[in-house]
């Protein structure tokens, strides 16, 4: 509606959630912009401006001059922003189209964040199991006494969204944090600055008044004991769908720094790593190749309807089917 009010000839609003489309359409009608704003319940990555072979009209009549989008999570790229921009640049936008936001920078700092107590009870033992390879969103600025940065933040990745082809390549970067104080690194916190245009930026930094924007991303890791004045070598990675951090084992002996937390069964860890790799491959295939998605969705239906044939518990088979089809 802002674009229509500013003078746009036509606006196409795309939303994958049917409920949000219904709400959006109602708002547009009630504000008198139904003649200019068209809502499409689509995945923008599957849209085009060409008539289908079966005669189905195109999703859009013409390519767009401007794209304004919000498909970011606390870790910036976890909702597929890089893939959406690449698809839009290839099929939905004119060559000189403007993209808003146009760029982003990601920053990271090693932090100590531990559970102590709750409601008067000692929950310190939970720290022994507080580990996961992916990140969660946390409002760090709202809990200043519960975490501590052990080094100054550094920039780890920058994305120019106009360079969509380069952004679609997974990347790895080695960085070293200068530790400021003794402590135990239990997580990496990262956040981003989002460039809207030549003048305007949004930031999710925990060190400022970010307002009602995204949370910071916090990735729990195997705890590492550090000392002031030392360097902490880290590998930052992104696979175009998520950013992760790990100790650089080529530069330091993890065993010398480990605090012994978390605890895990080595056999379970091997199985977990295999399952994680398989899930990542499924996610990449679904996102990048519609034909692969159809194959996997068909397999999910077969498993969900006949779990006994595949040796899968009925409840887990049902969850897998629903997750793949939603």
Image: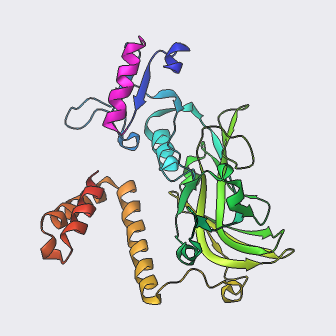
Q: Quadrant of residue 12?
A: top left
**The one of 60 and 16 positioned closer to us in this rendering:** 16
Residue 176 is situated, as x and y percent measured from the top left of the image, at 77, 70
Q: Quadrant of residue 279?
A: bottom left
Quick check: is 21 in the magenta stretch? yes
One can see residue 115 in this view = no
| Side (left or right) of 156 relative to 127 | right
Quick check: is 227 in the magenta stretch? no
Residue at 66%, 89% (x, y): give it.
255
Q: Is residue 65 above or below residue 202?
A: above
Residue at 67%, 32% (x, y): give it.
197
| Side (left or right) of 68 relative to 199 | left
Highlighted range, magenta: 16-33
**The one of 180 and 40 positioned closer to us in this rendering:** 180
Q: Is residue 131 above or below residue 6?
A: below
| Side (left or right) of 116 relative to 326 | right
Residue 50 is situated, as x and y percent measured from the top left of the image, at 33, 33
Residue at 71%, 84% (x, y): give it.
257
**The one of 267 and 193 positioned closer to us in this rendering:** 267
Q: State the predominant SS element of the stretch in magenta.
A: helix
Q: Looking at this view, name the residue that lies furthest to the top.
A: 32
Residue 131 is situated, as x and y percent measured from the top left of the image, at 54, 72
Q: Is residue 141 above or below residue 127?
A: above
* Coloring basis for residues: rainbow
């Amino acid at each position: 509606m802002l674009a229509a009010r500013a003078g746009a000839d036509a606006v196409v609003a795309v939303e994958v959630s049917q409920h949000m489309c219904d709400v959006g359409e109602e708002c547009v009608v009630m504000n008198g912009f139904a003649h200019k704003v068209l809502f499409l319940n689509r995945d923008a990555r599957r849209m085009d401006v060409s008539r289908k072979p079966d005669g189905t009209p195109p999703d859009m009549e013409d390519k767009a001059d401007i794209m304004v989008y919000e498909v970011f999570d606390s870790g910036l790229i976890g909702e597929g922003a890089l893939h959406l921009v690449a698809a839009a640049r290839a099929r939905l936008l004119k060559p000189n189209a403007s993209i808003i936001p146009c760029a982003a920078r990601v920053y990271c700092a090693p932090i100590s964040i531990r559970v102590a107590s709750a409601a008067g009870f000692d929950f310190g033992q939970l720290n022994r199991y507080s580990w996961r390879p992916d990140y969660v969103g946390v409002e760090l600025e709202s809990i200043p006494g519960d975490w501590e940065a052990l080094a100054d933040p550094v920039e780890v990745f920058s994305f120019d969204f106009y360079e969509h082809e380069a952004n679609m390549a997974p990347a790895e970067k080695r960085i070293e944090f200068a530790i400021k104080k003794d402590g135990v690194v239990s997580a990496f916190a990262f956040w981003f600055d989002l460039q809207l245009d030549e003048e305007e930026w949004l930031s999710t930094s925990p060190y400022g008044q970010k307002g009602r924007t995204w949370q910071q991303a916090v990735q729990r890791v195997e705890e590492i004991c550090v000392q002031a004045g030392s360097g902490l070598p880290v590998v930052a990675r992104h696979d175009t769908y998520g950013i992760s951090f790990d100790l650089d084992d080529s530069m330091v002996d993890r065993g010398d720094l480990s605090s012994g937390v978390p605890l895990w069964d080595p056999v379970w860890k091997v199985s977990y790593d295999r399952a994680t790799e398989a899930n990542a491959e499924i996610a990449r295939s679904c996102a990048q190749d519609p034909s692969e998605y159809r194959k996997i969705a068909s397999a999910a239906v077969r498993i969900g309807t006949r779990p006994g044939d595949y040796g899968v518990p009925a409840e887990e088979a049902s969850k897998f089917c629903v997750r793949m089809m939603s």
